[in-house]
Image (cartoon, coloured by chain):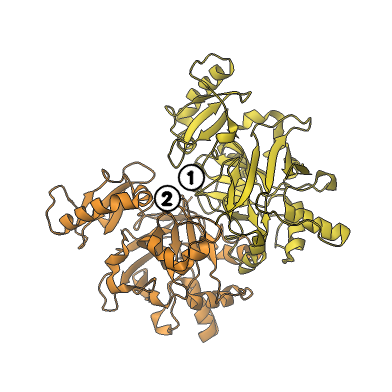
Chain colours: A yellow, B orange
C-alpha cells in the first residue's frame, strides 16, 4: 500500500491511500484519521485498507481523486520520535575526516544514532526556511522506516515484523554547528533543523526485490539546481533497519509512529557520487587537495528520487524543494 | 493554574484542572481534551480555564472530584519534542570528571542540549521498567518548562512569553552507556530511557516569587529509599529557561507542547547534596578518594518534591516511584 497525507487544517493532516500507479487516491479518514492513528491501530485497520487498495488499483472505486504529489505534506507531519542513524560507514568515516573529529569507538559493531526534531516535518515540495547561508546549509538523502509499537529489548529478528512503512527523507543539516555539537557529546541540535519527506510512505511489499535484508536496494538520485549530484544505492548500509531498531529499543520502547533513519546514503564507489554536499567536499579535499564545492544558497533547489537499477521510479515519489531565508 | 492528566484510554490522557490546595479537581475535557491540545490553543482556552480555576478554588463548582495525585499520568504522556539542557554548570563540570570526558568547548557561553525520548513519559508513581542493574541506573531531578508555538529565531526576551507551564522531572539515566554515547558525538540514546514527571504542570504565576529570572527558586528534595539524598535549589541555573528556549529555536521552530529541561539541579554548596547518584559518586571520588555509593537496584525507590526555602511543598506534587526489571 502507498499512503500520502494532505492538509486538512489538523496537525497530523488527512490520510490518503494512493493507487499503485500513483494516478489516483482515495480519502481513507473513515478508517484512520491520519497515518499516526493508522500505525497505532495497524492490525485493526490493515485488512480494510488492503481491500480498498485492491479496489483502487482495479478501478472499482468511484469516489477517487487525481493524486497530486506536489501538494502533499510529509506522510507524518509530526511523530513522537525520530531516530536517525549513521548506518553507512563509508559516509561516517568520510565525515570524521571532514569534521576532523576523533574516530567513533566500536563504530563497526555498535550503531550510532541521534534523536532529531519530530514536531514539524516538511512536505516534499515545501520551501525550507533557514536562518542563514553562513550556517553551511546541506541536504542529506536517506531512507527510513516507520514502526508500530516496539517493546523494549526487541531482537533484530523480531524487529523486522514491526516495520510497517518505508520512507525517503531529506535530513537537512547545518554543517557550521556540527563539529561543536559533536564535541559537546550531547549530539546535534542546531545542526539538524526539521527534515523533509517524499510524499509516499509505502508498505515493504511495494518495494518487491528492492526490500532485501532489511535494506532499500534502490538508487537515491540527488540533483542540485538541476545538475546530477549523486545516485548512491541503499544496499550498502552496514546495519540493517531491524538491527537499528533493536539497538534503539534496548532501553526504551518505541511507540507506534517512531521513524528510524538510515543516515546519508553513501557508497564506496566514487562513481555513485554523494547524497550530501559535506561528503563531496571531503572527497574533493582528499582527491584534489582542496574543497571546490560550496554549501547551499537561498533559492537553491534539491531534488531527490529513488530509482531502480533500471532507472524506473521508486515508490516514494519526489522531493523537490527550495531553501529560503526564514527572516 | 494547576493541571494534571488521568488515564482515559487515550495516548494523551484526560485533562484535569486541580485546585490551589490540591484537594479538588474538575474534568475540563470539554475545553481541551488533553494538555497538548490546550497548549496548541492556549490563547483561546486560557480565559475559560482561568474562570473555572477561580470557581474551583472558591468552592463554587459542584461537579468536582477529590484529587488523587498517585494515579496521575505524566501531565503530557507524550510530546513531539523533549529538549534537555545541562544548565547547571556545577553538575556538568563534575560529570566531566566523572566520565573523564574532554571539557566542552564554550560551555560558559553556549548551552548544551540533547533531544530525548518524548513518546512515552511516565507518571509520578508508575514503576520504571529497565533492562539491567548493570546499566548504572540513576535518577536526575530537574525542572522544566512547556512552551506554546515558538517561532524560529526567537530572542530570549520574547521566549519568556512562550513559557506556559512549569514541571518537575526525573530524567532517568543509564550511566553505563553515557561515556561511549558522548564519545560518538551523536549524544545520548540508550543512556536516556523515558523520563518521569511530577503530577502537576503549573502556570508560572503559581510559583509566586519562586519563579524569578526565568528560574525555579525552589529546593528539589530528593530521597532515595527513604533517606535524604539532596536538596539543591533551582536558582543556581547558569542559563535561564528563556535563554535555553532561544538557543533551541535558533534553527527550528518549537511546536506547542515542546518541553525544555534544566538538566540535573546542582549547587556549588556541598551541603545541598546532589539530585543524581553520578554526581555524588564523583564528589566521593574527589573528597574521599574513592567511590562509596552504588547505582540503583531493582526495587529501589526515589522520591522527589520541590519545596520552598521554608520547607513548604512546591506546586508540582511528588514523584515517588520504584525501579523494576523490564523482563
User: For the view shown, which residue lies furthest in the right direction?
Assistant: A288
Residue A182, quarter of picture = bottom right
* B192 with respect to B141 (left or right): right
**Residue B78: which numbered mark, if any?**
2
Image quarter in which the N terminus of chain A is found: top right
Residue highlighted by disc 1 = A255
Which residue is painted at 74% across and 66% down in the image? A100
Position above or below: A95 against B264: above
CA separation in Å, label 1 and label 2: 10 Å
- Helix, strand or loop under label 1: loop
Q: Chain of mark 1?
A: A
Residue A3 picture location, percent across and down: 55, 31
- Pointer 1 with pointer 2, Cβ within 8 A: yes
Count of number-bearing discs: 2
Q: Residues within 10 Å of mark 2 (few under 14, many from 20)?
A: many
Image quarter in which the C terminus of chain A is found: bottom right
* B284 with respect to A291 (left or right): left
Residue B181, quarter of picture = bottom right
Between B129 and B120, which is closer to the camera in this rendering? B120
User: Looking at the picture, do discs 1 and 2 lie on one chain?
Assistant: no
Amino acid at each position: 500500500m502507498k499512503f500520502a497525507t494532505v492538509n486538512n487544517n489538523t496537525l497530523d493532516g488527512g490520510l490518503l491511500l494512493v493507487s499503485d500507479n500513483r494516478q489516483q487516491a482515495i480519502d481513507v479518514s473513515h478508517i484512520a484519521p491520519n497515518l499516526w492513528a493508522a500505525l497505532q491501530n495497524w492490525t485493526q485497520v490493515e485488512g480494510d485498507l488492503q481491500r480498498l487498495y485492491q479496489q483502487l488499483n482495479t478501478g472499482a472505486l468511484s469516489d477517487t481523486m487525481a493524486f497530486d504529489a506536489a501538494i502533499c505534506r510529509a506522510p507524518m507531519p509530526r511523530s513522537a520520535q525520530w531516530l536517525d542513524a549513521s548506518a553507512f560507514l563509508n559516509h561516517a568515516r568520510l565525515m570524521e575526516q571532514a569534521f576532523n573529529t576523533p574516530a567513533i569507538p566500536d563504530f563497526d559493531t555498535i550503531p550510532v544514532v541521534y534523536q532529531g526534531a519530530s514536531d514539524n516535518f516538511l512536505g516534499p515540495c515545501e520551501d525550507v526556511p533557514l536562518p542563514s547561508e553562513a550556517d553551511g546549509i546541506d541536504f542529506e538523502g536517506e531512507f527510513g522506516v516507520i514502526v508500530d509499537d516496539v517493546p523494549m529489548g526487541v531482537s533484530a529478528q523480531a524487529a523486522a515484523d514491526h516495520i510497517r512503512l518505508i520512507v525517503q527523507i531529506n535530513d537537512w543539516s547545518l554543517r557550521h554547528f556540527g563539529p561543536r555539537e559533536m564535541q559537546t557529546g550531547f549530539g546535534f541540535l542546531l545542526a539538524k533543523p526539521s527534515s523533509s519527506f517524499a510524499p509516499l510512505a509505502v508498505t515493504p511489499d511495494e518495494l518487491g526485490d528492492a526490500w532485501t535484508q532489511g535494506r532499500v536496494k534502490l538508487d537515491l538520485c540527488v540533483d542540485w539546481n538541476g545538475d546530477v549530484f549523486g545516485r548512491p544505492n541503499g544496499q550498502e548500509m552496514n546495519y540493517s533497519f531491524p538491527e537499528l531498531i533493536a539497538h534503539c529499543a534496548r532501553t526504551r520502547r518505541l511507540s507506534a509512529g517512531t521513524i528510524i533513519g538510515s543516515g546519508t546514503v553513501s557508497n564506496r564507489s566514487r562513481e555513485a557520487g554523494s547524497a550530501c554536499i559535506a561528503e563531496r567536499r571531503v572527497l574533493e579535499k582528499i582527491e584534489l587537495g582542496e574543497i571546490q564545492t560550496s554549501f547551499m544558497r537561498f533559492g537553491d533547489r534539491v531534488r531527490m528520487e529513488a530509482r531502480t537499477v533500471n532507472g524506473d521510479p521508486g515508490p516514494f515519489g519526489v522531493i523537490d524543494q527550495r531553501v529560503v531565508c526564514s527572516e
